[in-house]
Amino acid sequence: MLALARLDVSFSLVSDGRNLLAAPRVSAVADRIGALFGRQLAAQLLPVDYTNGPISIRGFVQRPAEAKSSGRKAHLFINGRPFRDPFLIRAAENGYRATIPAGVRPTLFLAIGIPGDRVDVNVHPAKLEVRFRDKVFIERAVEEAVRDALRPLEAAVRMGGSARDPAGTDDRPFAGPAPDQRPAFPGRGEDAGTYGFPGLGLEGPSAPADAYGSRFLQVFDTYIMFETPAGIAIVDQHSAHERVLYERAMAELRAGGGAAQRLLLPLTIDLEPTELEAVEHNQEQLTAIGFEVEGFGGRSVVIHAVPNPHPRFDARRCFEELVADLAHGRLEGLNRLERFAATYACRAAIKAGQTLDHGEIRDLLHRLFACELPPHDVHGRPSMVQLPLSELERRFGRA
C-alpha cells in the first residue's frame, strides 16, 4: 500500500537472490498498479475522478465484466495515507448495483481527499483506521464516485439523429422512456472517448444506426452484429433489452407508475399460496410497471391491464414467472425496488431465439446506448462484446 501512496519512491523486494518486486518511480498511479499487480489487471480498470464540495475521490475501479468472486484487491487512502474501512468498501460495491451479480467483489483503488478537520486519523495505534465527522456523507460520496466512474461506459456509443427521434424512426417497439423524458445523448461530451467500450471506436457523435449505413446482422436469432471503426461489435439482444427494461422500470417505480395496456379479455391466473403472498407484498410495484391485479377468490387473481414492453410480450408468462421469482426470493443482493425491477426486466425482455426485424434492432440499440449503464444486464453479464479489427487481420494473416 505504501508503494501505491508514494509514486515518487522506488520499491524493490529481493529474497534469496530473486527479485520479487520491482516498482520504479512513476508519475501515474496506473503505471504503479501495473508494476505491482500486472498489466492485465491495470487494463481492467476504469478511472475515478469525483468531487463533492470539499471531498474528492480519485483512483480506479474494476470493470464489472472483469470482477470475480475471489482474488480482488481493495486499497483505500485518506489524504495520501493508506487506511482500512470495510464500510467504505461496501459503499463502493453498492455503486456497482445491477451491474454485477451477488457475491462478486470488484477490485478498488480509491484515494479520498478531505479537509483535516473532517477526519480523525489518530484512532488506531498503527493509524490504519480513521473516524470521519460525517461518515454517512463519505459513504454516499464513495458510492456515487463509483457509479459515476461506471456511467461513462454508456457514453462511448451515441446514437445519431435528432433529439426528438435519435434512432431515425418513430417506431419504437422496445419501449423505454420517451426521448423527451431523458437526455437523447447521455455522456460527457469530449471526455466520452476516454472511457466506454474500449477499442470500439464509437466515441464520435454518431453510432451504429446511422454511422455505418444500418448494416446490422442478427445471428442465431440471439446476437446483433455490426461494424465499428475498430472492428465488430456483438450485442446480446436479451441482455440488452433487459438493461433497457430495468432502467425503465426503476424510473417508473420511483415516479409512482408508468403506462399500461388494458385488456379486452382479462386474464385469470391461479397461484400458489406463497405466490399470492408475493402479489400482495408487491402490489404497489406491480401496478407501477403496468400490471393491474385484483383478487378473484381462492388462489386466483384477475389481471385487467399489463405493461407493453415489446410486440412479442407474453403477459401471462411474464406475470407467472415474475411472481414465482418474487415468491422464491431470487436476485438477492439488491434493495427491494432494484430486485423487483431486475426480476421484471429479466422476465419481460425479448428472448434469445426471437427473430427481430431491422426497425426493432435499430430501436433496441438506440435504447441500449441511451441507458445509464448499458454494458451489462441485471445479472452482471455483458450486453456487448467486441472483436477488434486487429484480431481479424491477425487471424487472416493481414497483420
Image (cartoon, helix red, strand yellow):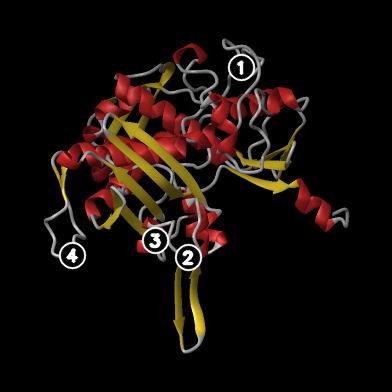
Q: Viewer-nearest of labels 4 and 3?
A: 4
- In the rendered image, which quarter is residue 164 located in? top right
Residue 166: give its label.
1
Q: Which residue is mark 3?
A: 73
Circles 2, 4 touching at the beta carbon (< 8 Å): no
Above or below, comparing residue 371 to residue 21 in the picture: above
Q: Viewer-nearest of labels 2 and 3?
A: 2
Q: Which residue is mark 2?
A: 36
Badge 1 element: loop
Q: Residue at x 25, y 40 (%)?
A: 114
At label 4, counting other C-alpha atoms closer than 10 Å, the crowd grade (few under 14, some 14-19, many 20 or more) is few
Q: Residue at x 51, y 84 (%)?
A: 18
Q: Quadrant of the C terminus?
A: bottom right
- Identified by mark 1, the residue type is Pro
Taking depth in this image into account, of 351 and 375 the one nearest to the observer is 375
Badge 3 element: loop
Q: Which residue is mark 4?
A: 126
Taking depth in this image into account, of 105 and 360 the one nearest to the observer is 105
Estimate the x, y position of residue 166 in percent, counting from the top left: 61, 16
